[in-house]
Image (cartoon, rainbow, N blue to C red):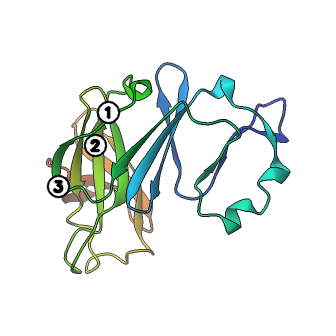
Amino acid sequence: MHRRQEPNAALLALNTYCSPFVVPESRLGIWCPEPGYLRLMCFDPDQLAAFPLSDVAGWFKRSQDRIYSATAPLAEIEISSLLAAGKHAVEVAPEFRGIDELLLVGPYPSTSNDDAACAILVLHPRAGEVSVLPQTWYTANKCDIGYQWITRVTRDLATGRIIGSGIRIRDFELTEDGTGLERWLE
């Protein structure tokens, strides 16, 4: 990310699996999976310090870090990837409380090829809770894990259902409880 008038002065560099989101009123959120947890960061775009692209040239190849910034985030949240299905209380930094709902996709621990291999986490920052929805249709027996994966999900405002897309997965709609595949979308 850079300012339009300064294309060679980067403000933020993202590695693989990073997803941006808006944090009301005018902040930038980034979430990404990390080993054992999902990491959420909040930045003030107007406060990001520029850095030359040469600072990160080749850096991501050697690093497991998902993000590079010369400016520390205003706030961070870590949500465990090991939470069981259902609702859980989570500590949410005040900077994120302007968000009504945020849908995240992360790995889910499975012990057999029939167990869910990923989960959708429905974060409600104002309530300080997250609901873990294991994707019972996304299993090693039904999908080629690592070759196919869910990349993004959102809530259909008309139906309230979760819809999504992925890599080598057709667009989909989930069941009412958010854990099963209702149908493939055209």
Horizontally, residue 55 falls left or right of residue 169, namely right
Residue mark closest to the camera, 3 vs 1: 3
Residue drawn at (46%, 22%), measured in percent from left and top? Answer: 24
Closer to the chain start, of discs 3 and 1, is 3
| Quadrant housing the N terminus | top right
Is residue 19 placed above or below 181 in the rendered structure?
above
Regarding residue 132, the answer to whether it shows in the image is yes
Horizontally, residue 18 falls left or right of residue 10, namely left
Q: Secondary structure at mark 3?
A: loop
Q: Give 165 or 147, whichever is nearer the viewer.
A: 147
Residues at circles 3 and 1 in contact by the CB criterion of under 8 Å: no
Q: Quadrant of residue 96?
A: top left
Residue drawn at (27%, 60%), measured in percent from left and top? Answer: 82
Residue drawn at (74%, 36%), measured in percent from left and top? Answer: 2
Regarding residue 186, the answer to whether it shows in the image is no
Outermost residue to the top: 25
Residue, disc 1: 101
- Mark number for residue 2? none
Residues at circles 2 and 1 in contact by the CB criterion of under 8 Å: yes
Q: Quadrant of residue 170?
A: bottom left
Q: Secondary structure at mark 1?
A: loop
Distance from the alpha carbon under mark 3 to that under mark 2: 11 Å
- Label 2 sits on what residue type? Val
Q: At which x and y percent is residue 146?
A: 43, 74
Closer to the chain start, of discs 3 and 2, is 3
Residue, disc 2: 122
Distance from the alpha carbon under mark 2 to that under mark 1: 7 Å
| Label 3 Cα crowd, 10 Å radius (few <14 / some 14-19 / many 20+) | some
Residues at circles 3 and 2 in contact by the CB criterion of under 8 Å: no
| Label 2 Cα crowd, 10 Å radius (few <14 / some 14-19 / many 20+) | some
| Label 1 Cα crowd, 10 Å radius (few <14 / some 14-19 / many 20+) | some
